[in-house]
Amino acid sequence: MDTITTSTKARLLFDIGNMTVIPESRKMAFYETQANISDENGNLIAATNGCWIMDATGDSMQNGSGLSPGSFANSWCTNTSGIPFSNAALIIPFPGDSNKFILFHQVGDYNNPVAGLPTRLYYTIIDKSLNSGLGAVIINQKNLIAFQDTISVGFAACKHANGRDWWVLALKDTSKIIYKVLVTTAGISSVTTQIVNMPTPFFANAGQPCFSPDGTKFAYTSGRINPNYEDVRIFSFDRCTGQLDSIGYILKPGYAGFGLSFSSNSRYLFYSSFGQVFQLDTDAPDIATSDSLIANWDGFAYPFSTNYTNFWLMYRAANGKIYISSQGGTIHFHVINNPDSAGIACDLQQHSLQLPCYGGYGNVNHPNYYLGCDTTCGPCLNTGLAEQAGHDFKFSISPNPNNGTFKIIYMLPQNRSGMFEVYDVTGKKVFSYTLPPWSTLQHFDLGMLSDGVYSCVITSNDYRVIKKVALIKD
């Protein structure tokens, strides 16, 4: 990497288990607020930094300017890189309409006496079929208000158990109240609240509210700089009713931080202060006792001493890894290579990903778009997606060859479970594992098998894909 500039921009492409850094030219820059959505082939449809919406050309989407009106947005959207709030925007498909998307977004309010916090959750409707397929914001459906109240920074979304609708959760500041917005084919169907059982109220300095990939858990962290401490709250979540129940609470005096992410298998929860990363086992009988220190910041800064690579926000990518941004305007990301593993076996490599440009603070906010339905509370509803004549599983095995320990990455048909099977050269099945409908990555240890070449098969919804894997032990 020969040149680092402040004007260069780049995007990260995750495809079949790989990650590629692609320098590009576009008008939009990002601060902390980032949201985007692509089609099933990974082609960008829309992105936002909380100030305006970008289309696939990298320019402003038709009717996409002027998000979240007011003096706060005006001050940050003029000659800056966007809104300075983490997880303050996300885009979800409009239930029952494959052409439309709903962008939820929030900004601060200088008229709010509580530190410029948001006082409303906005939403804006995008139709990708408009403007010759580049998409446009529908006239009179921009900056609509889902609800009004003083809310903490950041929110999260999870697919309803019916496989079509969505839950969007936001937290009322300085309280124990969580807002739950239900999105259906009618748009905003209902807005309800729940008082949750927690020792302390929520706070303005929000972290990254997030759901586990399987939709059964919801977590939230807040880092308070004065006084200095951090707390992490973990809830079980009922995708049918939206009910939350507390299952874990961690309080750490002397810490402050905002990063939060579940592992791909929904078991481990990673959270960070500015200088440390921790892991919790959310399946443990007592989650607090599973608290484990994963890494201390090594003090690295590059290219100048002010470009420090501490720990800020987290993003679980499609390749199963977790990427951690920094606060100091740096060109590096930290990477957790094996988040599904306990303790330091998760393999956090500090500043191991280098970009062609400066970045800082932000990480994109993506819900699990592929979470399937749960028929325990009713039938699966039409997702609006057409049936496919075939299916691209995007199936990969790595490393290959290996010593029996490897991972698979795949994409199952929408709302379908799958089966992973391993066959030896004689055609005998030697291993099988059920793949949940929301899953995209699994790790396996088949060290009990002999050296040789095996056929790995994924089947789902009458589709099948086969790949060979070579097991070679030292």
Image (cartoon, rainbow, N blue to C red):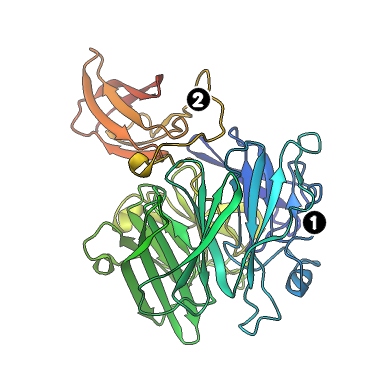
**In which image quadrant can residue 402 be found?**
top left
What is the count of numbered marks? Answer: 2
What x and y, as percent, mark residue 178?
Answer: 47, 68
What label sits on residue 392 in the rendered view? 2
Of residues 210 and 265, the one nearer the viewer is 210
Give percent across and percent down for residue 382.
Answer: 51, 34
In this picture, residue 343 sits left or right of residue 175: left
Per the image, the residue denoted by label 1 is: 65
Residue nearest the viewer, comparing 231 with 462:
462
Instruction: Please tell me which residue is depicted at 71% across the width and 81% down the height of the picture.
Output: 111
Q: Say which amino acid is labelled 1.
A: Ser
Q: Is residue 325 left or right of residue 7?
A: left
Q: Residue at x 35, y 53 (%)?
A: 346
Check contact, mark 1 vs mark 2: CB within 8 A.
no
Q: Residue at x 50, y 34 (%)?
A: 16
Disc 1 from disc 2: Cα separation: 36 Å
Q: Eyeballing the image, is 301 above or below 137?
A: below
Say above or below: 388 vs 441.
Answer: above
Farthest residue, direction top:
426
Element marked by disc 2: loop
Residue at position x 65%, y 53% in the image: 103
For mark 1, give the secondary structure.
Answer: loop
